[in-house]
Every structure is written in structure tokens, then in C-alpha cells.
Image (cartoon, rainbow, N blue to C red):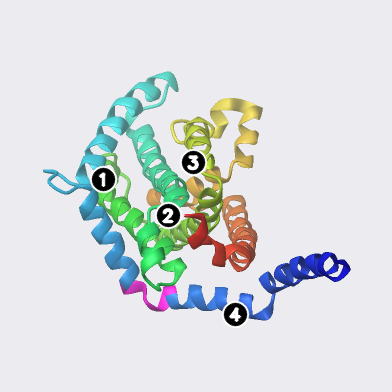
Amino acid sequence: MGSGTESLPVILMSGHAHAWSRAAFATAFADIRDGVVTWRISALMGWSELRRRYHRSLLGPFWITLSMAIFILLVGGVFSQLASTSLRSFMPYVATGYVTWLLLASFVSDGCNVFIAATRFLRQMRLPKSTFVLAMVWRDLMVFAHNLPVVLIILAVCGIRPTLWTLMLIPAVMATAAAGVILGLVLGMVASRFRDLIPIVTSLLQLTFFLTPVLYAPAHLGQAGDLLYLNPATHFVGIMRSGFLGEAPSLLNWLAVLGMLVAGGLAGFLMFVRFRARITYWV
């Protein structure tokens, strides 16, 4: 009897230690490495899911592009009057901010469902779990690419021309995509374990949209606008918008983005080490 009660904490401690063992770190790293190496599988899965979503649809994912164009034209026109700003200068600001927001919001919402939606694959196939996260990022980037023509047309009509600073759009997109991978890993694991997170995140996204400088500039709020820089989305919108507009990027925005990627990447990897083996059971 005594030996049985003494063995229970030993078993619990050994299980906890195994979760942080060198083998657990190696397995998690190998999963991510294999997911990156087999990126073609992720791209194919992302494209297939996009086609499935819009099967038998006349415009397919371009419905999103059409709705985005209508939103930018209507809301941009109204807010330009409220802000007493010319439509020619305000429309590019709204277009570049909104297309970036849609990408960020899709990473968050799709990230919550990334493993839940892949339940059948997780239980029947031996694929790296990171493959599903990368497929989600690929899919959302393809929708982002579909939306780009609207933004480029607005920029051209409003007289925005490319500059050397426009090249900064490339690392900005890469940084935003990296954030999508981190969000997919973290939110995917947490939402698989706690399903209540999904409606909570959906509600928070609606609120966060109005706390992100998409339809207005922080300067419009005076001193209160400084609080917007506590919102992570503000910095991602900032680096993307400056690239689209061909303007010098904000050093604060880039430092904040890089800091969040390092901290979030480390936290996400440690979570993946700890809970990777449980994902299949949670879904």
C-alpha cells in the first residue's frame, strides 16, 4: 500500500520531466523542420481548402475581394469627410490598412481552428503537425494576394508611386506571415483544448478592429492615440502600410514587430514542445 502511494508522485514527475526532455525538444524541432521542408504539401493543402470553400461559387475567393472593395469605397468616403481629409490621400490609407487587417484577422480566426479542422488528417495520417499551420498561412496569403489588385488600383488612381521604401513591403509581408505561423501554433493548441476560446476570440477581433488605426490615424485621437501602440496589430498595420505607400517605416513599429516575433516564437515553440503530443487527443 505504501509503495503504491509513493509511486504516484514519481509517475507524475516523470511524465512532467518527459514533456521537457531533450527528446521532446528534438521531436518538436523535427516537426517544424519537416513541415518547412515539405512546404509543397502545405501549399497544396491550402489551395485545396480554398477551392473547397468556394466550390460551385461563381467568383470564388474574389467575393472577399469584391466585399473589401465596396467596404473601402463606402467607409473610406464617409470617414474622409469625418476626418476632413481629401479622398485622394485618405483612400490609400484605408485600403492599405484594411487589407492588412483582413490578413491579420484571418490568421487569428483560422489559427483557432487549424487543428480542429484537421482532425481527420491528424487521426489517420502521420504528417507533421506544423504542416497544417503552414497550410493555413498559405491559404490566407493566397486570399491576401487576391485582394492586392484592389489596393494597387486605388494607389495608382490616387497618385501613389513606388519608391525604394516600397521594397520594405517584402520583409513586412514575411514578418506578418511569421506572426501567422506563431498564432496558428499557439491559438490552435489552446483552442483545441479549450473550445470556448473560439467565440471569445471572435468577439475580441470585432473590438480590436476599432482599436487599430485602420480607418483613422493615431494623431486623430490626440494624446489618447498613444494607447493604440499597445495594440500589437497597430505595428503590423504600420509596417505594411508604409511599404504600400512607399514611405519610410517607423522604427518603433519594426522594433515592436521583431520583439513580438522573438518573444512569441520562443513561447510558441515551448508550448509546442510541451503539448504537441496531446493535440491529437484534444481534437
Q: Circle 4: is it few (<14), some (14-19), or many (20+) Cα within 10 Å?
A: few
Secondary structure of residue under mark 2: loop
Hey, what amino acid is under mark 2?
Val
Give the residue at mark 4.
Answer: 26
Give the residue at mark 2.
Answer: 114
Magenta span contains residue 39? yes
Region in magenta = 35-40
Give the residue at mark 1.
Answer: 156
At a point 52% along the width and 48% down the height, the residue shown is 191
Quadrant where the N terminus sits is: bottom right
Give the residue at mark 3.
Answer: 198
Q: Earlier in the sequence, mark 1 or mark 4?
A: 4
Magenta span contains residue 80? no
Judged by its main secondary structure, the magenta piece is: helix
At a point 61% along the width and 31% down the height, the residue shown is 225
Q: Circle 3: is it few (<14), some (14-19), or many (20+) Cα within 10 Å?
A: many
> How many angstroms separate mark 3 from mark 4 (CA)?
30 Å
Q: Are marks 3 and 1 in contact (CB under 8 Å)?
A: no
Residue 41, image x, y percentages: 32, 71
Q: Circle 1: is it few (<14), some (14-19), or many (20+) Cα within 10 Å?
A: few
| Image vertical order of residue 139 relative to residue 18, above or below | above
> How many angstroms separate mark 3 from mark 1 (CA)?
38 Å
Hey, what amino acid is under mark 4?
Ala
Lateral position of residue 157 relative to residue 209, left or right: left
Q: Earlier in the sequence, mark 3 or mark 2?
A: 2
Residue 232, image x, y percentages: 58, 46
